[in-house]
Amino acid sequence: MELKELVINKGIIGVIGTYKSTLQKEGLVKDLDIKNISQALKMVGLNETFISKNIEELSLNELWKIELASKLHKDIIIIGALSDVLNYKDIEYIKKLLIKLANDYNKKIIVIDNSLEVFFNLVKEIVVVKDHEVIYKTNDYFDKKLYEYVKIPKIVEFINYANKDKKRINKTIEIYELIKDIYRSVS
């Protein structure tokens, strides 16, 4: 199954891999092809002062947000490298924005990253692509085969370690749920 078919069926998918930005890195932000630029900047967490800024002077974080703003009008939005560029607070905000775009505006979203934590509570399917071909897909963060392609998140590693002899705690990707489950199992 091709990525385009997957994203149409699932809405938001995560692709394990590296992402290369397609944003033009010269000129002013207002020269970019961004529909309704003030509204788009506001949606991605930037104010209107960025309209007149030089693209070359922006930080990586700001460049990433400008690139997302330039893609908001598209039906299929392809973004990536969240874990490399954004801090935790920005990642959580962008996740909420992407979910809103998918649910309310019927946008199809492909998120490309090497960190599975970015996909938590966001994607409906995790896909591994090699040479433009889907070689593996899953929707289970506890799928052992997935970790042949990507580094295991600490929370998954901890739960697998705690459950290696017998099931002691539930499988979850939420830290607060894990803490509650540990507390329940001890008391």
Image: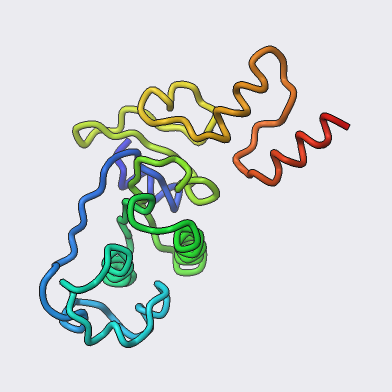
Left or right: 134, with 88 as reference point: left
Residue 186 position (above or below residue 41)? above
Q: Foreground: 31 or 159?
A: 159
Q: How is the image coloured?
A: rainbow
Give the residue furthest to the left. 26
Residue 66, how many percent across, how many down?
28, 71
Q: Foreground: 8 or 109?
A: 109
Identified at 14% across, 68% down, the residue is 25
Residue 43, how many percent across, how many down?
42, 76
Give the residue furthest to the top. 165
Left or right: 46, with 51 as reference point: right
Left or right: 23, with 84 as reference point: left
Please state, as top left, top right, bottom left or bottom right, where the N terminus lies in the image: top left
Identified at 76% across, 34% down, the residue is 182
Residue 24 position (above or below residue 49)? above
Please state, as top left, top right, bottom left or bottom right, where the C terminus lies in the image: top right
Residue 142, how many percent across, how many down?
55, 28
Residue 68 position (above or below residue 138)? below
Number of dots carrying numbers: 0
Quarter of the image holding residue 37?
A: bottom left
Identified at 15% across, 71% down, the residue is 56
Residue 136 position (above or below residue 180)? above
Give the residue furthest to the right. 187
Identified at 52% across, 46% down, the residue is 120
